[in-house]
Image (spheres, helix red, strand yellow):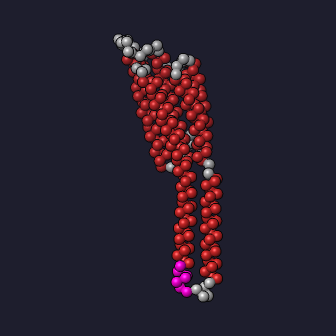
Amino acid sequence: MVYRTIDANLVLQTLEKLRLRIGERFPQAGLGKVCAELAVLAGDTQARVTGLAQPMIWIRVGVALVLAMGAGLAAYGIHAISFRSGEAEMLSLVSALESAVNLLLVVGAGVFSLTSLEARLKRHTAMRALHELRSIIHVIDMHQLTKDPVMFGAARTKASPDHKLSPFELVRYLDYCSEMLSLSGKLAALYAQDFNDPDVIEAASDIEQLATNLSQKVWQKITIVQASNPAMGLS
């Protein structure tokens, strides 16, 4: 099972190493701060995913109390029917049975409400966290947006972005963006890994797809830079 699930600790370690790599290569770039924020979000994800996998004890206790109360009332009703069986008429027996059925329906509704409450609370926590991941993915995309391969040798205007990166540095910068996008998708997958909720699984899949699409766009830029500079290697 070690190689069949995503380990949140390993994702966190990978993000921390990536943050150090970005800081060493581009100490003044804001991308390092974004990666640091993503690492913090990864730590929060680890704690949240662990919490989602744990049962909510107070809700489970509430379910047990409702079941115990229902069983107690049912036992009392059966005892009352047995006690009066010798003198009870059919009408009173039918009335008692109807009350017992109503009691079962109320108890069942109470149990369903409590059990669904746990799922709803966990779903709300997961969806809010996934929204944070979606937001930071767009922030990462904004950082690579102006890193255009056509800037090399192109005529500049007054409004042109200020580019100080060499082809090699541009490839490294874009590659870091791609890694951050991929790791963001893996963080989203953690919520769907141990929490089998259809809405959460769908939202996590959408975020993974978003990260993949943006990463492909980044790699298109990398390919253009490498094709324009065939002697350049990666490190």
Q: Position of residue 178 (x, y in %)?
A: 48, 28
Residue 81 pos. (x, y %): 60, 80
**Residue found at the very far bottom of the displayed protein:** 87
Q: Which residues are magenta?
A: 89-95
Q: Is residue 91 above or below residue 188?
A: below
| Magenta-drawn stretch contains 10 | no
Residue occupying image coordinates x 56% and y 42%: 5
Q: Quadrant of residue 35?
A: top right
Q: Residue at x 55, y 24 (%)?
A: 33
Foreground pick, 123 / 185: 123
The image position of residue 144, as x and y in percent, is 45, 24
Q: Nearer the viewer, residue 227 or 218?
A: 218
Q: Quadrant of the N terminus?
A: top right
Depth check: give the residue in front, 93 or 177. 93
Location of residue 174 with respect to 195 vertically, above or below: above
Q: Is residue 92 magenta?
A: yes
Residue 19 can be seen in this image: yes
Residue 210 lies in quadrant? top left
Image height of 203 relative to 29, above or below = below
Point out residue 230 in the picture as x, y percentages from the top left corner.
42, 16
Above or below, 174 against 45 in this view is above
From the image, give the main secondary structure of the stretch colored magenta: helix
Image point 51% across, 49% down: which residue? 197
